[in-house]
Amino acid sequence: MTVDASNPNSIGTTMAAFSPIHLKDMNAVSLMDRVDTKFIFNRKELVGILTDAQNDYAALEIDGLRIMGYKNQYFDTEKKQFYLDHHNGKKNRTKVRVREYVDSGLVFLEVKRKNNKDRTRKTRIRIPEFRTTLSSEDLTFVNKLVPQSSELYPILQNNFSRITLVNIDGNERVTFDLQLNFDNQEKTMVLNDLVIVEVKQATFNRNTTIFKLLKARKITPYRISKYCIGAASLYDTIKGNAFKEKLLRINKLTTA
């Protein structure tokens, strides 16, 4: 992400004021089994929220960077069953992706499963490189977690920049995703002015600083999936009624 560090209101300058936390110290807050709460807002709100969070959170830093690049390749069945499960309101649902943590050079095959108690569990294995097709070994790993997924297809890529904050006093991580773009090899979509916040906690706690900062700005929790928003936008023939309101809200929020 490009930022103007000479501008006192820039995101880069704001991030420089946080105390750092490094990758080796993140295990304590890996939160692979967690409760997620999401929010969306226009990027113009970001600097103010980050500034107000500086006393209570540390910022993940890798090789001097505090705004990191992420690259995702999502996979689904031929009929896009993972997407449809989400669209149709199924409580137990799955996402399968290859994720590259661009600035650290790490790549993982990840399976995210959400259960009917709103808990998210992420299981992953490290792989040597980013890829858009799954090997037989990859599918063996996925099938142990998601039966009947013997054939999975690349559906879309999603790239974005991420800021990760860690609560100094508690078991909580907060991610801010910005500069989102989506690509299915036929169409692209760019959402430069949208910020998606995800608060990740071992147990739900609305009394943390980030909840209070967002509430003060009238930013309320909002269920959203980057994969589903991207798929609903890029595939003309896919069932998308359940996401129309979300797409309209995103459009209104980013054009305000």
Image: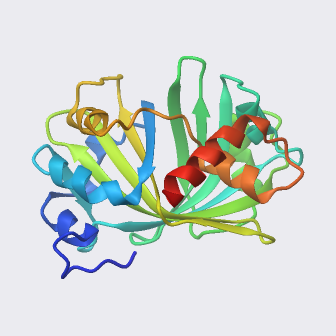
Q: Is residue 56 left or right of residue 141?
A: left
Q: Residue at x 40, y 75 (%)?
A: 1
Q: Residue at x 86, y 55 (%)?
A: 236
Foreground pick, 93 / 234: 234
Toward the top, the furthest residue is: 117
Q: Is residue 211 left or right of residue 248?
A: left
Across the whole image, how many numbered discs are drawn on residues?
Answer: 0
Q: Residue 66: horizontal and vertical position, in percent?
A: 28, 66
Instruction: Establish if 196 lies above or below 143.
Output: below
Q: Residue at x 37, y 79 (%)?
A: 2
Instruction: Establish if 139 lies above or below 214.
Output: below
Toward the front, the furthest residue is: 256
Residue 163, quarter of picture: bottom left
Q: Is residue 71 left or right of residue 202?
A: right
Q: Residue 200: horizontal and vertical position, in percent?
A: 38, 36
Camera sees residue 250: yes
Foreground pick, 7 / 27: 7
Instruction: Establish if 66 lies above or below 40.
Output: below
Q: Residue at x 14, y 58 (%)?
A: 18
Residue 217, quarter of picture: top left
Q: Residue 132: horizontal and vertical position, in percent?
A: 71, 66
Q: Residue 165: horizontal and vertical position, in percent?
A: 27, 50
Camera sees residue 110: no
